[in-house]
Image (cartoon, rainbow, N blue to C red):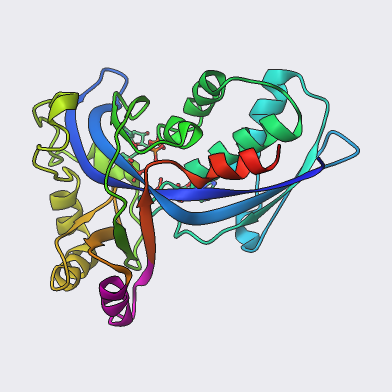
Amino acid sequence: MTTITLPAVAKLNLFLHITGRRTDGYHNLQTLFQLLDSGDELTFTLRDDSDIVLSCNDAALVNEQNLVLRAAHMLQQYSSCTKGCDIYLDKQLPMGGGLGGGSSDAATTLLGLNKLWQLGLSNDELAALGLKLGADLPLFVRGRTSFAEGVGEKLQPVDLPERVYLVVTPDCHISTAEIFQHPDLIRDTPCISAEQVLTAHWQNDCQPLVERLYPIVAITLQWLVEYAPCQMTGTGASVFAAFPDQTSAQHALAHLPPSCRGFIAKGVNQSPVWAALADTE
Ligand SMILES: C[C@@](CO)(OP(=O)(O)O)[C@H](O)COP(=O)(O)OP(=O)(O)OC[C@H]1O[C@@H](n2ccc(N)nc2=O)[C@H](O)[C@@H]1O
Ligand SMILES: Nc1ncnc2c1ncn2[C@@H]1O[C@H](COP(=O)(O)OP(=O)(O)O)[C@@H](O)[C@H]1O
């Protein structure tokens, strides 16, 4: 096996409760991560030397800060592996939109290179390595729709109905750090237990602040709520709504405001990356 192609799917935060601020500046949160069935795609090809070379359909993404390269270098160093690879990233997800695309690309890189380089690392090892790159990495390494606590790394799988989502991203960039640093952020939501996840009130504590600071997000939510109940994911700017079927989601998508990007995806309990990895065996 010298080439592997794997998906890197998006996530939604069906709720995002911020329960407190930690001494290291980060916030404790409780969230319900819903994995989607679509996103980016990565192709890994073994090289004859130990170089790691990234190419991408968006040339602006080819730089050392790309989480794909950072994950690949980290894995190579951690495992003392002398093999290299070419990586092609087919970027489809909006960036910085609260969909976790960068984290998902990095997690798929850890899973793909663990296989291509025949390292035999466990999922626990890969999730712990991934956490060094971002709070959402362990979710995508484990690949299960989950209730998460801590900064998002303490995960409990949850089975949800596989619903159809319309995801809409307004044309604005929101800095996660700016939202978490803001004095007006809701950061005192009472903790719920894992048993309360399905019955709790699902809200995104970042949403009122983001709607105020970025009116385009509020306007997009006002448009979407005409079709279905909707919410923001992560620290924005993407918003989403669940629909009973593809047809009704398509109907809303057809009326998308001109400045927005949108796509329809199915919520899944298990990331397709696992089926794709199994196919490589
Ligand atoms: C809050 C979530 C929910 O999914 O937002 P999205 O990024 O998906 O929108 C994520 O956990 C975000 O994870 P990630 O995007 O990896 O955040 P990081 O780069 O680690 O953090 C950026 C900055 O946000 C703040 N931060 C982040 C996460 C957290 N639990 N508490 C924080 O206070 C910190 O100031 C940090 O320096
Ligand atoms: N492979 C990648 N895909 C997307 N963004 C990346 C990638 N590597 C690094 N980044 C950086 O990470 C930031 C957050 O990206 P992303 O994961 O898409 O958003 P979010 O954390 O809001 O869900 C981007 O603005 C970009 O600067």
* Residue 193 position by quadrant: top left
Regarding residue 67, the answer to whether it shows in the image is no
Q: Nearer the viewer, residue 62 or 264?
A: 264
Residue 170: percent from the left, percent from the top? 32, 67
Residue drawn at the location 26% of the way across and 17% of the way down: 23
* Residue 40 position by quadrant: bottom right
The quadrant of the image that shows the C terminus is top right
Per the rendered image, the range of residues in magenta is 247-263
Specify whether 139 is left or right of 198: right
Compared to residue 99, the image places residue 70 above or below, namely above
The verdict on residue 248 being magenta is yes
Residue drawn at the location 48% of the way across and 41% of the way down: 103
Residue 99: percent from the left, percent from the top? 39, 51
Q: How many marks?
A: 0
The verdict on residue 26 being magenta is no
Q: Nearer the viewer, residue 249 or 176?
A: 249
Regarding residue 151, the answer to whether it shows in the image is yes
Specify whether 126 is left or right of 169: right
Residue drawn at the location 37% of the way across and 42% of the way down: 269
Residue drawn at the location 26% of the way across and 28% of the way down: 27
Residue 250: percent from the left, percent from the top? 32, 76
Specify whether 181 is left or right of 92: left
Compared to residue 151, the image places residue 62 above or below, namely below
Compared to residue 56, the image places residue 149 above or below, namely above
Name the residue furthest right: 48
The quadrant of the image that shows the N terminus is top right
* Residue 122 position by quadrant: top right
Residue 96: percent from the left, percent from the top? 41, 52
